[in-house]
Image (tube, rainbow, N blue to C red):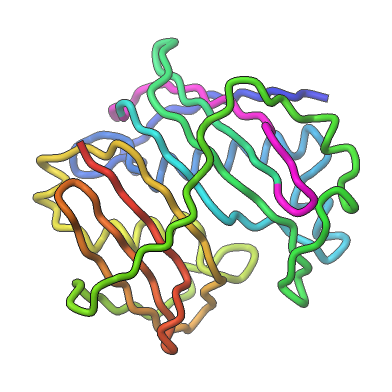
Amino acid sequence: MIKVFSKEYRVKHNDTDFSGLLSIASLGNFVLDTAGLHAIEIKTSMEILNKQNLTWVITGMHFNIIEMPKINSEIKITTKITETSRLACKRDFFVEHNQKIIAQVSTEWLIINCETRRPVFLTDILPHINNLITPENQIDKYHHLRFQINEKALKNYYSVAYSDIDINKHLYSMRYIELAMNTININYFSNHKISTIDINFMSEILYGENIEILTENFDNIYHIEMQNSEHKPMFRAEIVWK
């Protein structure tokens, strides 16, 4: 089986933001696509799990951005499984442009039961996964974010719609990122570049849910939290800018 997998992509116009550079959400889409293709190669795909009424869910991400490629750039994304535990699988990604690493992304995944929405033991479902680990040159894991949002933080409200929902029937992971970024003034994007992002997917957000998005910043750091109607935290992100 292929332990280390690579896929090439071209940055299209709809993958970029107003600056003509690859957006964070589009980078995330490329990362998830690469993960899915590798999962097919190593027999850990969503299709295999779905036959057992199971599915993959992502619980956390860490982005380390050196530079973002421009529109029409050719990039290569390489992924590998770097660590597993009884419940979780850590998968790392290396993004190259002109044979130079321009970004790194670390992700953590669980397998859940589609009916109970509870995690199951990873190694019970995919016992061969431990033979696929390539632990060398790991990327830093995402941080578990425990900040408290101030009551005076900027508040935005959103109702989850049809176009927000993915195959798991919850808010698509990159849509969380898009909604979080939408709370930041465009002028800030014009004058700053993202250095790192840590993301915690804490609970599923479902179709029709009304969420509150709270945003506050401290110098070059933004904290963003999504809460449900009962003020339960569902998502947190910490963005460090340069």
Where is residue 110? Give x, y as percent.
70, 55
Q: Is residue 204 magenta?
A: no
Q: Quadrant of the N terminus?
A: top right
Residue 36, quarter of picture: top right
- Residues drawn in magenta: 68-88
Q: Nearer the viewer, residue 31 or 221?
A: 221
Asked whether, in this view, residue 209 is left or right of residue 237, the answer is right
Q: Is residue 17 left or right of residue 46?
A: left
Residue in view at x 61 percent, y 71 percent: 169
Q: Looking at the image, which is closer to me, 202 or 162?
A: 202
**Number of numbered discs:** 0
Tell me: residue 5, above or below residue 213.
above
Instruction: Write the residue at 42% across / 39% down.
Output: 63
Side of 121 where 15 appears, left or right: left
Vertical order, 9 against 228 (above or below): above
Instruction: Tell me where residue 181 sits by quadrant.
Output: bottom left
Q: Residue placed at 31% from the left, 72% from the top? A: 213
Q: Quadrant of the C terminus?
A: top left
Residue 89 percent location from the top left of the image: 70, 45
Q: Residue furthest top?
A: 99
Q: Is residue 80 above or below residue 44?
A: above
Percent x, y for residue 204? Answer: 56, 71
- Name the image quarter holding residue 206: bottom right
Image point 12% across, 42% down: which residue?
190
Is residue 71 on the magenta stretch? yes
Percent position (x, y) of residue 191? 10, 40
Instruction: Decide: is 43 above or below 205.
Output: above
